[in-house]
Amino acid sequence: DTGVSQNPRHKITKRGQNVTFRCDPISEHNRLYWYRQTLGQGPEFLTYFQNEAQLEKSRLLSDRFSAERPKGSFSTLEIQRTEQGDSAMYLCASSPGQGNEKLFFGSGTQLSVL
Amino acid sequence: KQEVTQIPAALSVPEGENLVLNCSFTDSAIYNLQWFRQDPGKGLTSLLLIQSSQREQTSGRLNASLDKSSGRSTLYIAASQPGDSATYLCAVYNTDKLIFGTGTRLQVFP
């Protein structure tokens, strides 16, 4: 059990560029969550997967955002045409998938859009 | 819509003090409540999880209580240490996701 792994740790990009983040959950965890956190705020829910199925998306997830989990293992979060308001920490979490359970978080990807 | 509030937003105490962090939520239909610690620029570390049927959980110097009917939880930290300095986040689990408060930023000075 190596924990939830996120890459990259930091990403600096120019406005208008596309970026992609990767999350590797704990092995055999069926659920995978994405959250976004801005400075001084708590994490905000973006979306979650049960295996490869994306079951819920927040209204925060505009059409510039897309998340995938093609084989029910790792997940990617892509942001197209980045805006300065996208600057935030993007956190990934996983859980066994039974519901009503502890979530394990990764260290996050810090995105800065210039 | 579930809303989670944490009071105070920031707290500064001398080493050795016992302290209480507060969390309130608007919808009592929760499955569990979790407390996390977050160091600057880092991810979240789970501290305690209280199921909706439980009243409290303890881990070392930490004790968390839950009063679901009144929509409140407290995190009690005994004999605080400078290493406890961090942001503490409360989150409630319902409708298949965690909903977080804005956190309490704690500083413990020697």
Image: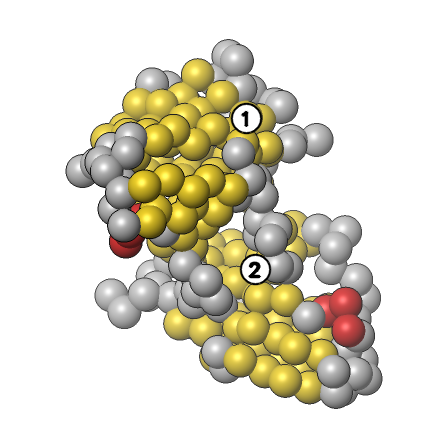
Mark closer to the observer (2, 1) = 1
Image location (x, y in percent) of residue B98? 53, 42
Query: Horizontally, is A92 left or right of B36 in the view?
Result: right
Query: Horizontally, is A38 left or right of A74 in the view?
Result: right
Outermost residue toward the left? B60
Which residue is pictured at 77% across the width and 73% down the height?
Answer: A84
Mark 2 neighbour density, 10 Å: few (under 14) some (14–19) many (20 or more): many
In this view, the residue in front, B22 or A69, is B22
Quadrant where the image shows the N terminus of chain A: bottom left
Image location (x, y in percent) of residue A110? 56, 73
Read off the chain for label 1: B
Circle 1: residue type = Ser
Outermost residue toward the top? B69
Which residue is denoted by mark 1 in the rendering? Answer: B24
Which residue is pictured at 63% across the width and 59% down the height?
Answer: A38
Q: Is residue A20 above or below residue A59?
A: below
Give residue A34's mark: 2
